[in-house]
């Protein structure tokens, strides 16, 4: 699969506004492993203005189902990486999931690939909650930061049940605008009804 990403990267490196739209086709999710970590790194480099550390990538190898590559027609075109974590500093158990990165290469957007990646994350978190016998060990929410100017991502997450919890000034150091929205989606039942992952 070493060269599979190359053509997608080439597409992205050119003017994506004029790229041929990719045909709708089956999306395969592949767990992130040391064998494909380099592809994850390359997709993230194209997608995000932030450079992630080697530690970030090594950490992706530890989160299991929460780190996935999206493959379409044999090409790696999207990625998600999440971190289960504790909401309180000295708490040992993870009670929330942070979406560190979720992105789809530009020529492949609006084909449902981002939704597929996000639904996988939500479904895995919900499965972990179902398997937790002690309610105190459940994951309570999924959250992430989105740059306030990122309308695409805002629409995407709001379409999937996320709400703006707050605006965080000076969240970013090297990109403008520096503010981020903190977006949150509950994983716990409200009013007796379990949250529904949108179709
Ligand atoms: C945000 C992002 C991941 C969406 O991926 P995608 O594969 O294009 O999204 P999908 O095709 O699954 O869209 C699902 C739904 O989200 C909403 N949505 C997605 N992109 C949208 C846009 N640009 N404008 C309005 N709504 C949008 C729509 O409701 C869409 O459903 P529809 O196409 O049936 O109308 C993608 O735009 C991206 O990679 N952006 C750059 C990286 C980034 O900013 N990531 C977020 C921070 S982690």
Image: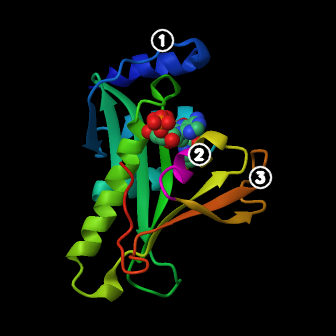
Number of marks present in the image shown: 3
Look at mark 2 in the image and give the residue it sits on.
155
| Left or right, 152 with reference to 199 | right
Segment tinted magenta in the rendering:
155-161
Q: In whole angstroms, how far apart are the C-alphas of marks 3 and 1? A: 33 Å
Mark in front: 1 vs 2:
2
Look at mark 1 in the image and give the residue it sits on.
20
Q: How far across and how far down the image is residue 143, in percent?
A: 52, 63
| Marks 2 and 3 in Cβ contact (< 8 Å) | no
| Marks 1 and 2 in Cβ contact (< 8 Å) | no
Look at mark 3 in the image and give the residue it sits on.
178
Q: Looking at this view, is 91 or 57 the one in front?
A: 91
Mark 2 C-beta closer than 8 Å to ligand 1: yes
Which structural element holds mark 2? helix
How many residues crowd mark 1 within 10 Å: few (<14), some (14–19), many (20+)?
A: few
Q: How far across and how far down the image is residue 92, in percent?
A: 40, 85
* Residue 69 shows in this picture: yes
- Identified at 49% across, 87% down, the residue is 90
The first of marks 2 and 3 along the sequence is: 2
| Vertical arrangement, residue 89 with respect to residue 139, above or below | below
- Identified at 63% across, 52% down, the residue is 146
Q: How far across and how far down the image is residue 45, in percent?
A: 54, 36
Where the N terminus falls, by quadrant? Answer: top left
- Identified at 41% across, 16% down, the residue is 7
Q: In whole angstroms, how far apart are the C-alphas of marks 1 and 2? A: 23 Å
Which structural element holds mark 3? loop
Q: In whole angstroms, how far apart are the C-alphas of marks 2 and 3? A: 19 Å
Which structural element holds mark 1? loop
């Amino acid at each position: 699969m070493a060269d599979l990403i190359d053509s997608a990267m080439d597409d992205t490196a050119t003017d994506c506004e004029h790229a041929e739209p990719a045909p709708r086709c089956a999306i395969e999710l592949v767990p992130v492993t040391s064998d494909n970590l380099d592809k994850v790194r390359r997709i993230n480099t194209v997608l995000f203005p932030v450079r992630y550390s080697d530690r970030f990538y090594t950490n992706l190898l530890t989160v299991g189902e929460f780190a996935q590559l999206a493959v379409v027609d044999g090409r790696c075109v999207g990625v998600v990486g999440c971190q289960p974590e504790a909401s309180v500093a000295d708490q040992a158990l993870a009670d929330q999931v942070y979406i560190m990165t979720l992105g789809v290469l530009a020529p492949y957007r609006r084909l449902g690939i981002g939704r597929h990646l996000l639904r996988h994350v939500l479904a895995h978190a919900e499965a972990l909650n179902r398997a937790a016998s002690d309610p105190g060990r459940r994951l309570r929410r999924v959250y992430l930061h989105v740059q306030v100017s990122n309308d695409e991502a805002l629409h995407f997450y709001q379409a999937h049940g996320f709400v703006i919890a707050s605006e965080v000034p000076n969240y970013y150091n090297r990109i403008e605008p520096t503010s981020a929205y903190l977006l949150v989606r509950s994983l716990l039942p409200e009013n007796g009804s379990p949250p529904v992952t949108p179709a």
